[in-house]
Image (cartoon, rainbow, N blue to C red):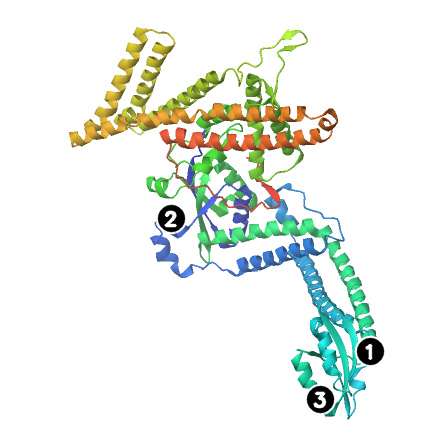
Amino acid sequence: MAVNKMEKMTIIAAAEREEEILQAVQGMQAIEIKDFFHSNVDSSYLEKHFSTTFLETEESKKNHFQALLTEIQDSLTFIERFSESTSKKKSIKRQIRTLHSLEQDFDEQIIRKYLKEITSLKSKLTLIETTRKDLLSKEKWLARWQYLDIIPKENSSESTDILLGSISSASQIDFLADLECLSSVYVEEIYQSQNHVYYSLIYLRSQLADLDKIISRYSFIQVEYPYDILPNEAYQKNKEELASLVKEEQQLKSNLASYRNHLAEIYLAEEMTYAFINREEAKKHLLNTSYFFIMQGWIPVDEKQQLSTALQRVLPKEEVYIAFDEPTNDEIQADIPVKLKNNSLVAPFEMLTEMYSLPKYDEIDPTPIMTPFYMVFFGMMVADIGYGLLMLFGAFLALKLMVLPRGMKRFADFFLILSFPTIVWGFIYGSIFGATLPKVFLGIDLPFPILSTTEDVNTILILSVIFGFVQLLTGLMVNGIELTKRKRYLESISESFAWQGLLVGILIVVVGMLIFSNDGLVTAGIIVAAISALSIVIVPVIQSKSKVKGFAKGLYGLYGLTGYIGDLVSYTRLMALGISGGSIAAAFNMLVAFMPPAARFTVGIVLIIALHALNLFLSLLSAYVHGARLQYVEFFGKFYTGGGRAFKPLKTEEKYVNIEKTKVEE
């Protein structure tokens, strides 16, 4: 398994067949359209003979679908916002569909009818909302003046007038005292709030100047009464209008709620509109003339026959020309996209490689090599049978009971696979939800724990370093093989095989001294390490014109041994995280065990579930992050460069449905 081999596809067909061919290509979801005029194709012949027939890509259809998409999204937002309170919320259940079936069910006229009706309801509800705010404001104002028993306009005369207004409550006593100096002014308190007092003043017009001085002194806020009926009547009428408005709003929301029955159609219409927009965007990369069009793109080699068969389903073979070409060296270096191809066990781990960087087209895919190491490391860091079983059942049920988006499905597959090494390491450590497995069961002696996280810490530490040592050697081996394939033999020695020899030689010395106390082994290890170190220094001398610079470069390269020591130390986190997670789980169990029986079997049950859920989350997060770090820094750094461009086929957004690749019979 490796990087999927690509070929350059060229399609030439009559201009009127463009839409059918693009639909077939989009349904396959396996072809990346490339810009014709930015490719390395010699188009001088076309420019010479067909330049007068070249057509600019029209934006009108794309703009049409973008406008439709905006209307659909606005309508969906509006329905979900306003009809939720009067109708049980219904969300579209994710489906698996083909693009062909989705397009067959799409009826733009019906969708536009729905959108027009929803827009009309939206306008009415918006108007009601504005009117209601106005009425509520009037109601608040009328509530203060509803006890006024006259209509100011009708009770004024040539000699008298009525003044309405309010002052601060703090000024009330002084204000009334000053008004008593004007014997002809009649004062009536209409309403008093926490901070203001509202008055009706009847006065002689001849004393207006004196009254103005007083009201100015106390910041009297004058009010104009705008109604031709009594305030109490206006207040009641306003409340009736509000009640009527509420009923009208409820009716409109009820009508809007009925459109929830059409939500699935509208959601799928949005999905299809995205597909149309992507298709129109792809047309910019084609060569269009009045008579024919030319499409170029990248296609995985194993999809070639599928493409030919798919095109034959929509138009006769003689009406389309298809050619496939091997990518040139320039295209491999600068243009060709990368698509990984792995089996179902390895494929979920591709997301780790993608997070780091895709390999270049001519580079090895590190995913299959990384996968077994990551599985072992992840299991070693979580290492609990109970947690592993929760991962297993959770991921399995999610995959079986739901149609997940592709990204979430890959994540579920990822944790489903990782649940098995987690369970295996749980048995090795003898841990289930932090509790220790019994050593005797039904009179049978059990071997658990095989490694105790309390008594065998040093053993687990050494085991972690051994795993790291094996992974480092694997990375160096892969690097050496790749350099050898590229015929860079001296570099394969200095950058790979010599380092393997140096590390193995040091390992033989350590084993000979600490385990076997064998001078022969120690001597053999020293010889292997010395020859390897000498190779690391000599190769740059051979490669460099300046032997002094080459020697200095070799010595500096040999100094990289300290980096390998640091790499090996990094793998001790496998021991640290595995022990810490188990210790935290055991501490949680102990905490609940100390509770009184009544609390232990009530609050304790809720508490232990919450605590273990937290520990599970932290354990999985730590294992995920630190496991990836060991791959990215310690492992990939030995052989992997990356920098590939992701393969982006013409497809749909898959926002609400998973588009199944169109299957055709060969």
To which residue does mark 1 refer? Answer: 230
171 vs 267: above or below: below
In the rendered image, the quadrant that contains the C terminus is top right
Q: Which circle marks residue 39 in the picture? A: 2
| 470 in relation to 405, above or below | above
Q: Quadrant location of the N terminus?
A: top left
Query: Considering depth in this image, is 318 or 226 the residue closer to the camera?
Result: 226
Local SS, label 1: loop
Q: Residues within 10 Å of mark 1 (few under 14, many from 20)?
A: some
- Let me know if residue 164 appears in the view: no
- Secondary element at tag 3: helix
Q: Residue at x 52, y 45 (%)?
A: 25
Above or below: residue 31 compared with residue 349: below
Q: Earlier in the sequence, mark 2 or mark 3?
A: 2
Q: Position of residue 334 (x, y in %)?
A: 36, 43
CA separation, marks 2 and 3? 89 Å
Indicate left or right for 132 with 566 as reference.
Answer: right
Residue at 69% x, 32% y is 606
Which residue shows up at 55% across the image and 48% down it? 23
Mark number displayed over residue 208: 3
Q: Residue 27 placed where, x, y %?
A: 56, 44
**Mark 1 or mark 2, whichever is nearer to me:** 1
Q: Amino acid at mark 3?
A: Leu
Q: What distance separates the C-alpha of mark 1 from that of mark 2? A: 82 Å
The vertical placement of 586 against 511, above or below, is below
Q: Amino acid at mark 2?
A: Ser
Frontmost of labels 2 and 3 is 3
Of the residues under marks 3 and 1, which one precedes in the sequence? 3
Tell me if mark 3 has few (under 14), some (14-19) or many (20+) residues whose alpha carbon lies within 10 angstroms of its own. Answer: few
